[in-house]
Image (tube, rainbow, N blue to C red):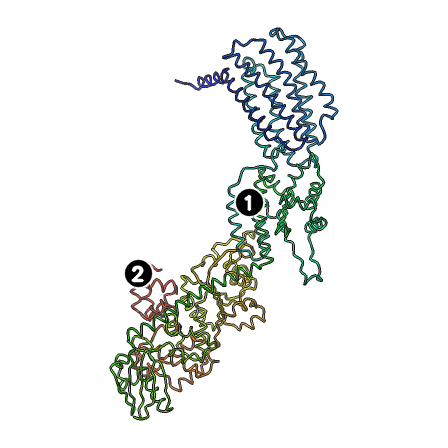
Amino acid sequence: MFSIESVIQYFLEIVTGFYFLFFVFTSAFIFKIGIVISLLLNTKSTQKEKTQLSLFVIAIIGAILINFTWILKAAHKTFLSSLDQRILMFFVRITWAIVTLHYHALSLFIESLLKKKNVLQNVRQKILIPISTVLFFFFVILAFAQFNNPVQRPFIELAVIKIAPYYYLFALLLISLFAVLAKIRSDEIPRILKKQFNILVKALFFPIVITEFIHFYPIKSLYTGRRYTITAISLSLLTYALYYCMKKIIGLRFLNLKSHVQSPDKLYFVNYFKTILEKFSYITNTRELVHISKSFFKEAFCIPIAKTHLYIIKAPDKESAQEEMPILTQDESTVETLLSTQGETSKIKKFLLKNKILIHDELAFSNFYKEEEKIVKIITFLNHLNADIFIPIYENHKIIGYIIVERFARVNTGNKHHEFYSSIERDQMIIFANYLGNIINLLKTKNLNLIIKQEKDLRDRLHNREKEITQYKESIRSFLHNRNNQEKNIGIISYKNRTFTPINQATQALVPINLNTHSGHPTSKTIKQIARQVIKYKAPQTAFIKNNAGEKLIVSGIPNIEKNNVIITVQYPEISDILECKISILKDPKNWEYLLYLETTEYGKLINTFIPSNSETFLNFKIDLLRAALQNKAILLNLPEDDIIPVVNLLHHISQRETVEILEVKKQYKDLSIPIKLFGINPIFGIPSKNIPLLEKLDKTGTLVIKNIELVDLETQDYLLDYIKYGQYKTFKGYDREKSDVRIILASSQDLQQCIQERILSHDLAQELSKYQITLPNIHKLPEEEILDFAYKITKQTVKTDEFHHILELTDTDKKRLIKSKPASIGELKTRVQQMLVKKSQRQSIYDETQFDPAYNLTDPQIIEAARLGKHALRDPKIMTLLWNKFKSQNKIANLLGVNRSSVNRRCKEYNLM
C-alpha cells in the first residue's frame, strides 16, 4: 500500500537526485543558447541598439557559462565522478569571474535602456567598472595560479567570495535599478520603453535579485545537503522568467528586433470587417460613415466610441468661392496647417504616404535614441492633436480625410493586452482606411444616394415588367381560349316588330335565354336597348353582355333598311372591341394595356367587381388602382375613410403578399412609440424595444399600411421617405442601415395640400409618392350620370336573381333620393343602394326569394368567398379560422355570414379558435 508520506518521499528523492538535477541544468543551458542565437539572428538597427543587444547577450552568455559549471558539478556527482578535481575547481573560479561580468553587463544594460547617451560616461560606472575589472581578473588569475591546489583555498579568495555578492546585488544591480526607476517617471521616456522596462524589472530582475539573495544567503536548515536542489529550482524559475520576459518584450519592439509592436492575430477581425463591408453598401451620406467608423474601431480595436474621430476634407467649390469659409475645429485647423505648409515633395508627406498611418508610441520609441527632424515634427503634430493614431485617408495619393484616435484611448479600457497597437492592428486600420477612401470618393463624385436609388428603381421596374408580362400573357390566353373553344361562332338575331328571331344555331349557344319571354333579364334588356337605338338613330350600336359562365360577349346591331329590321350579332370580342369603346375616355391613352388587363385578367375582374362602373372617373380610377397594384412602389391613398381598407385589401391581394399590418394613427403622438414600432431605436438611448421593427418583421412577405399619415410626426415621415427612396431603413436616432422589402401604403382621408400647408405632411414625401397617388373625390361631387351609372351597375351586381332585376330597378324617385343623400364614398354609395333594394324587395314581398350578394362591398377574395357561402361557411374549419384571424369578433363574422352569433360562438369553440 502506498501512503501519502511514501509518495512524497519518493518524489523528493527523484527531485533531489543528481540525474534529475543534471537534466534541469542541461535544459536551462540549451534554452539560453537558443535565446542567444535568436537574438543574434535578428540583430539590426542603430549602433545604440546594437550596444544594448551586446550587453544583454553578454549577460545571457554569462548565465550560460554559470549554468555550464553547475552541469559539470551535477555530472561529477553522477556519471563523471572521475573528473579531475582541479578542472572542476578551475571552472568554479572562472565562473566567479563570469558572475562579475554577468552582473555588470546586466547593470549597464538596465541603465542603457532609458538613457540616450553612453552609459559608460556615467560617473558611477567610471568607478564601478575598474572594481568589476579587478574582481574579474582576480578570479581568472586565481584559477590559473591555484590550478594545482583545488582543495586548499586561500583566505583572500574566501574573503572576496563573501564580500562579492554584496557588490553584485547592491552596488551593481539594485543601485542601477533604483536609478532607472527614478528616471522612468519622466514624460520623455516612450510608453513602449516604459512597458518593456516594467516587464523586465517585474518578470526578470526582481526574481534574479531574490533568487541570488537566497542563493548567497540561504537559510541553513533548507540549504544543508540540498545546495544543488535549491540552485536547480532557482535556475528553473529564472529560466522560465527569462522565457516569459522575452516572449512579452519581443512583441514590444525589444531592442528594435521588430519594426512594429506585435500581437497574436485576431481571427474575429474578419467577422467585424464583413459586417462593415455590408454596412458600406447601405451608406448614403458622410454622417453615417462617422458612426460606422466609431463602431468599427470599438468592436475591432477596443477603442471607446468617444475616442475615435473621422474628418472628411471638403473639396473647394468654385461656385461658392466667395461664400464664408467653413468653421474648422481645432483638430482640423492643426491638420490643415500641417498639410498646407508642406510642399508636395516634403519629407513629412512622403513619410505619410509611405507609412499610411502614424502611431505616437511607435514613433516616440523609434525616435528615442536617434532623433530625426521629420519624426520630431510628426510627434509634435500628434501632441497638438492629442492623438495616439493619425490615419490619413487617400484617393489617388491625395488626402481626402483622416481618422484621429485620442491619446491613451486604450489605457483605461481594463484590457492591458491592448494598451499598444500591434502591427496586425496597424495593417487592419490601413485596410479600413483604404475602403473608407473609396466610399468617401464615391459619395463625393458619384452621389451614392443616387446610385442606391437608381438600383432600387431598377428593381422596381423589373418587378413591374414581370407583373405586366404576366397580365399580358393572361389576357392573350383568354382571347385564345375563346377563339379555340368557340371556333369563332357568331350568333345572328333579327329584330322586327318588337320580336327577336334567332337566325342560326350559334345563337342558342351564345344566348341561351328566350329574349321575347325573359324581358326582365339583363341580357334581354341590353339587346333590346341596342335594337331600339339602331331603329331610332339609324346607325350601328354596340354593347357588352355576359353569358351564363360570366364570359364577356359583344353585341352589335346594324339597320337593315331593305327588310325594315335590325340585324343583331353576338360574338366573343376581339382585343380591339374591348379597347375601342373605352380608350377615348382614358386620361392617358398610353395606359390602354391596363384597360385590357381590367377586362381580361383575374386581377382586373376583382377590381371591376369592387367598382363595376366604367364611367370616365371610375374607369380612370380603376386604371390607377391596377397600375399601382402591379408596381412594387409605395402608394399614397387619398380616399374617403370608408374606402381605405377595401382598397388596401385589394392592393395587398394583387401584390401577392402574405401578411398585412395596418397601423392606424388616431392622434398625434408626442412619444417615440410610432418610429420605434416602425424602425426600432438606437440602443444607446437605453429604451427597451420588446417587438421586432415592422420593417424587419414584414420583410419580403408583408404590406405595411399607415392610416392617417398626416398625424405621424415629420421626423418619422422623413425616415419613411428615406426608406421609400432607397429600400433601406435607418434605426431611429441611429445610423445603421438595413435592407427591407415591405410594400408601403400610406393613407389619408384629409386634403393633402392643406396638410402640406399646415406642415403636418411632408412635402417631400407627398412629392415622392405623387406618381403613385390614388385619389378619388367624394362621390357626391361627381356628375349625376356617373353616380347613377354606378348605382345601376351595383344593382345588377347585388341582385343575383335575374328575374327580379326589372322589379328592383331604381326608379327616378329612388335616383333623386340617392343623389340627395350625398354619399361620400364608394362604400357608402353601395350601402345606400343595397338598403334601397332591400326595402323595395320587402315592399314587393319578394325579399325571401331575392338573392342579394353579401359580398357587395368586399375586396378580399377569401372573405368574398366566405360571405357568398353564408351559413355553409360555418362547416369549414379553414374558413372559420380565416374569418376569426381577420375580424376577431363573433358579431362581425355573424353579420358577414348572415347567421346568429350563437352559431358562430358554437363553431369557434368547436374549432378551438377562442
Image side of residue 597 versus residue 633, left or right = left
Q: Is residue 401 above or below residue 787?
A: above
Give the x, y percent position of residue 675: 52, 60
Q: Nearer the viewer, mark 2 or mark 1?
A: 1
Q: Is residue 819 visible?
A: yes
Q: Is residue 25 above or below residue 848?
A: above
Q: Secondary structure at mark 1?
A: helix
Mark 1 Cα-neighbour bin, 10 Å: few <14, some 14–19, many ≥20 = some
Quadrant holding the N terminus: top left
State the residue in front, 882 or 586. Answer: 586
Q: Residue at x 47, y 62 (%)?
A: 459
Image side of residue 906 versus residue 244, left or right = left
Question: Picture quarter containing residue 543?
Answer: bottom left
Question: Picture quarter containing residue 223?
Answer: top right
Please give the residue where the numbered disc 2 appears in the rendered image.
910
Image side of residue 12 versus residue 137, left or right = left
Q: Amino acid at mark 2?
A: Glu
Q: Is residue 587 above or below residue 718?
A: below
Image side of residue 756 versus residue 659, left or right = right
Please give the residue where the numbered disc 1 appears in the rendered image.
300
Give the x, y percent position of residue 128: 71, 21
Give the x, y percent position of residue 671: 55, 60
